[in-house]
Image: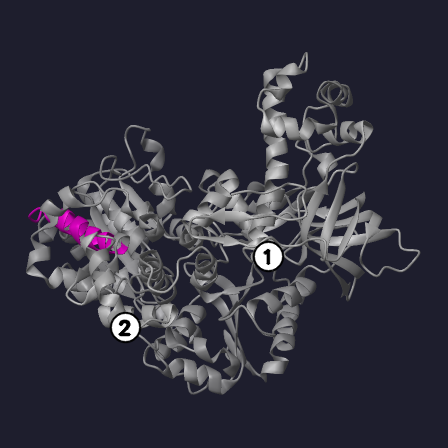
């Protein structure tokens, strides 16, 4: 590879292909120095700045001395001259702006200019005196000398080793980024994607792009197969090149898992999708798939083709369940002893368990593993409390966590996939509960401190909201469970399946390899709820006949798609006027885009619940605004702060850069009285939460739930989605939209069935007897491997 930092052309050569130089002399440009930095994001490098124009080939008005520029480029220094290539754009609110597509920093042409540049805030720890010594010793070519010779700074007297290293590193970062962005532009990448690629690979960017173009699919958000394939074609990966076919295979299997929840594809499905993606004949792919199978990069069973890590995850779930079931002991108590303990708890609680509930409690105590499933109002929480309390009574252990020390773990482990579900579980049982990730000691990088070599200890593990478990997490959870612990999965089989691949709860119920107790009776305290009656009608594919008639806890407002957003905002405004807070009210929509999608509704609802106020601070966020008082949703896991994907908080403070010790703007978000500090670049982890998706709401309950539904959501009009949404409502449910859309959602089940093999593994005699040998051949660490690591 050859390149020049400041020349007018650039050539990137490699064995697989080359990119022709791009002439910058013919490209319109504006050159100037920073006048004012209006906005800069340290993570995405998106910047808005005002520059003093020095020269330009653009057709500028004669009196124009300053131009506002926008785009993705590093933080500018006041003393450096930069050439920006792009075009002018009329912003509807902010007027004329120059949109930057590429940039080139001009080396200072005077010693004084070079001193100013080196002593700018781009280079921490280099003051004016130090910069003067560097320039005096190395001259006008100081930058090139430092970049090309690691020993160049040794000639500068009094310069400490750390300062030398920091200056060299900063220069390489700034000038290296410029070089890489230029090279990536030649490959056809825009500035935003180029920044993401550089952040993923840093100094290895060009090497990775040239040698492993398909790895970008996995490592860089926003790059799919087609974009990577376009790059690869320029490097010589065309037609039926083995690496191209391999990447297409991994991509198709990965997308099938992430988008459709499949753990495998039938071979014919895989070949058809690959042929369409690669524009090759199906028969041309057979030999390549055989090679991938022989190399164990994919795994084939009959006509099912798996990604390796999904295959081992499903195998692992089957293996670990076999191990746990193998420790089943004979009944340790008599029927009389059980009834006596149950009676004591009934008397203490002032309740009487129904026959099916008593059966569930007894089954849980006698079996090593059990599934408890049922809809709303069927008493799942009552049964969970009964299981815990009767077990404690019969085995004589305390349910007071303060009675246990660090080396004597609390015997009851209550976990759920999300923080909000764990909080609900703790509130309903008065016992400690936590997320699965927290119990397993997840470090944020797909690594867990708890596994088969360091298992969790206890007597009873209850996993709530088990319908949300994907096969990866289920495998990790089960292999971290110590022999002898009772395991109970609790969930509603009619809710949405997991976001990730697999359908663990449904498959385990279908496998029927250990007891499944279904609660179907609606108990007296729930019978008066029209929300619960509607949920059970939905399970049959029906809506209540009185759906349009207001009840004491449910109401529907019919409206068209164009009226929908206004109706939702008005309903929320009325609720707020009656004293309900934004945290009491949750709008659940099926889709993000469109005039009545999640994104648009959040902006409207922000104006409703938290309008601009001179007393409230604001900060730019994703093309909009975040202000103090906003309700926000966490989008990624932050295990170090015990904040997880799906947690909801409130912005309680926005601090300016000059108010913080780090000299960075900071935003403070309160999550259930736990304040977490975000820097500006961390804000990508947050989004407004006045409206969220039904998937994000799983495991939560809200006093008021508002569900907008219209025909334009057609692809998402599904029974389990509507069922999951309405069962989030604790006190009041408001439906808005077109009655026909609600009817269609009630009638329509999922358009496809998830292709999984977990249930069948329990029916396979070979599988059912191989769990001991599988422990010896299971691939260590496969859950942390990208399919593209095989390329």
**Badge 2: few (under 14), some or many (20 or more) residues near its Cα, within 10 Å?**
some
| Measured Cα–Cα span from mark 2 to mark 1 | 34 Å
Q: Secondary structure at mark 1?
A: loop
Q: Is residue 142 above or below residue 73?
A: above
In the image, taking residue 404 as reference, residue 421 lies left or right, namely right
Magenta-colored segment: predominant secondary structure: helix
**Badge 1: few (under 14), some or many (20 or more) residues near its Cα, within 10 Å?**
some
Locate residue 18, reporting x and y percent. 50, 53
Residue 94: say if magenta.
no
In the image, taking residue 172 as reference, residue 264 lies left or right, namely left
Which residue is pictured at 85% across the width and 51% down the height? 66
Q: Are marks 2 and 1 in contact (CB under 8 Å)?
A: no
Q: Is residue 295 visible?
A: yes
Locate residue 513, reporting x and y percent. 13, 60
Way the structure is coloured: one colour
Please report whichever mark, 2 or 1, sits nearer to the chain's N-terminal start.
1
Query: Which residue of the protein is positioned furthest toward the top in this rendering?
Result: 158
Would you identify the image quadrant in which residue 352 lies? bottom left
Viewer-side residue, 38 vs 226: 226
Q: Is residue 110 above or below residue 529?
A: above
Would you identify the image quadrant in which residue 397 lies? top left
Locate residue 618, reporting x and y percent. 72, 51
Which residue is pictured at 77% across the width and 50% down the height? 615
Query: Which residue of the protein is positioned furthest toward the right in this rendering?
Result: 63
In the rendered structure, find residue 282 and report the number of the disc placed on it.
2
Span colored in magenta? 310-331
Which residue is pictured at 41% across the width and 54% down the height? 214
Q: Is residue 508 visible?
A: no
In the rendered structure, find residue 190 and report the number of the disc placed on it.
1
Locate residue 611, reporting x and y percent. 72, 60
């Amino acid at each position: 590879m050859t390149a020049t930092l400041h020349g007018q052309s650039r050539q990137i050569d490699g064995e697989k292909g080359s990119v022709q130089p791009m002439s910058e002399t013919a490209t319109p440009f504006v050159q100037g120095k920073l006048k004012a930095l209006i906005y800069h994001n340290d993570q995405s490098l998106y910047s808005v700045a005002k520059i003093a124009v020095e020269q330009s080939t653009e057709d500028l008005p004669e009196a124009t001395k300053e131009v506002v520029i926008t785009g993705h480029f590093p933080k500018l220094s006041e003393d450096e001259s930069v050439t920006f290539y792009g075009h002018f754009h009329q912003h509807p609110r902010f007027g004329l702006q120059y949109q930057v597509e590429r940039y080139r920093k001009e080396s200072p042409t005077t010693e004084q200019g070079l001193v100013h540049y080196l002593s700018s805030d781009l280079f921490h720890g280099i003051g004016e005196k130090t910069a003067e010594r560097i320039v005096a010793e190395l001259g006008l070519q100081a930058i090139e000398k430092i970049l090309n010779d690691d020993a160049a700074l040794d000639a500068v007297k009094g310069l400490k080793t750390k300062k030398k290293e920091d200056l060299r590193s900063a220069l390489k970062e700034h000038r290296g980024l410029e070089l890489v962005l230029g090279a990536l532009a030649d490959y056809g990448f825009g500035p935003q994607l180029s920044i993401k690629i550089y952040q993923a690979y840093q100094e290895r960017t060009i090497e990775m792009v040239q040698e492993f173009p398909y790895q970008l699919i996995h490592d860089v958000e926003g790059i799919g197969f087609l974009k990577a394939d376009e790059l690869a074609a320029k490097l010589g990966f065309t037609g039926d090149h083995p690496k191209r076919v391999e990447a297409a295979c991994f991509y198709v299997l990965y997308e099938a898992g992430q988008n459709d929840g499949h753990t495998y594809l039938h071979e014919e499905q895989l070949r058809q999708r690959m042929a369409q993606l690669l524009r090759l004949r199906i028969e041309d792919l057979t030999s390549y798939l055989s090679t991938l199978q022989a190399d164990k990069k994919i795994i084939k069973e009959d006509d099912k083709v798996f990604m390796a890590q999904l295959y081992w995850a499903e195998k692992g779930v089957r293996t670990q369940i076999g191990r746990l079931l193998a420790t089943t002991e004979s009944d340790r108590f008599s029927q009389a002893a059980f009834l006596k303990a149950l009676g004591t708890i009934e008397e203490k609680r002032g309740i009487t368990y129904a026959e099916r509930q008593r059966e569930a409690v007894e089954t849980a105590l006698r079996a090593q593993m059990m599934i408890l499933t049922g809809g709303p109002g069927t008493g799942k929480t009552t049964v969970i409390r009964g299981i815990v309390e009767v077990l404690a009574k019969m085995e004589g252990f305390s349910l007071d966590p303060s009675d246990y020390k660090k080396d004597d773990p609390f015997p009851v482990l209550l976990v759920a996939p999300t923080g909000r579900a764990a909080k609900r579980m703790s509130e309903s049982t008065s016992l400690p509960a936590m997320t699965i990730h927290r119990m397993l000691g997840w470090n944020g990088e797909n690594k867990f401190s708890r596994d088969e070599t360091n298992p969790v200890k206890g007597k009873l593990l209850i996993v709530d909201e088990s319908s949300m478990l994907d096969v990866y997490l289920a495998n990790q959870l089960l292999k971290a469970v110590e022999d002898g612990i009772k395991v109970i999965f609790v969930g509603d089989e009619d809710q949405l399946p997991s976001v990730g691949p697999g359908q663990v709860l449904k498959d385990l119920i279908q496998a029927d390899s250990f007891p499944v107790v279904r609660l179907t009776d609606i108990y007296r305290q729930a019978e008066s709820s029209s929300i619960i009656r509607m949920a059970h009608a939905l399970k049959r594919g029906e809506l209540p006949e009185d759906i349009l008639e207001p009840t004491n806890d449910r109401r529907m407002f019919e409206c068209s798609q164009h009226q929908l957003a206004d109706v939702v905002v008005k309903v929320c405004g009325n609720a707020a006027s009656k004293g309900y807070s934004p945290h009491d009210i949750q709008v659940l929509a099926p889709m993000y885009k469109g005039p009545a999608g999640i994104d648009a509704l959040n902006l409207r609802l922000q104006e409703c619940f938290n309008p601009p106020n001179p007393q409230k601070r604001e900060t730019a966020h994703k093309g909009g605004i975040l202000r103090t008082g906003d309700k926000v949703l966490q989008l990624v896991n932050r295990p170090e702060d015990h904040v997880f994907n799906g947690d909801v908080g409130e912005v309680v403070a926005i601090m300016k850069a000059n108010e913080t010790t780090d000299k960075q703007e900071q935003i403070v978000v309160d999550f259930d009285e736990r304040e977490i500090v975000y820097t500006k670049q961390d804000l990508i982890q947050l989004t407004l939460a006045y409206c969220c998706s039904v998937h994000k709401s799983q495991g939560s309950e809200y006093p008021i739930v508002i569900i907008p539904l219209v025909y334009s959501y057609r692809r998402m009009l599904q029974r389990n989605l509507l069922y999951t949404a309405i069962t989030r409502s604790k006190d009041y449910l408001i439906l808005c939209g077109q009655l026909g859309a609600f009817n269609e959602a009630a009638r329509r089940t999922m358009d496809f069935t998830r292709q999984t093999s977990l249930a069948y593994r329990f029916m396979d005699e070979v599988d059912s007897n191989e769990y001991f040998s599988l422990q010896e051949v299971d691939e260590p660490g496969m859950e942390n491997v990208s399919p593209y690591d095989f390329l």
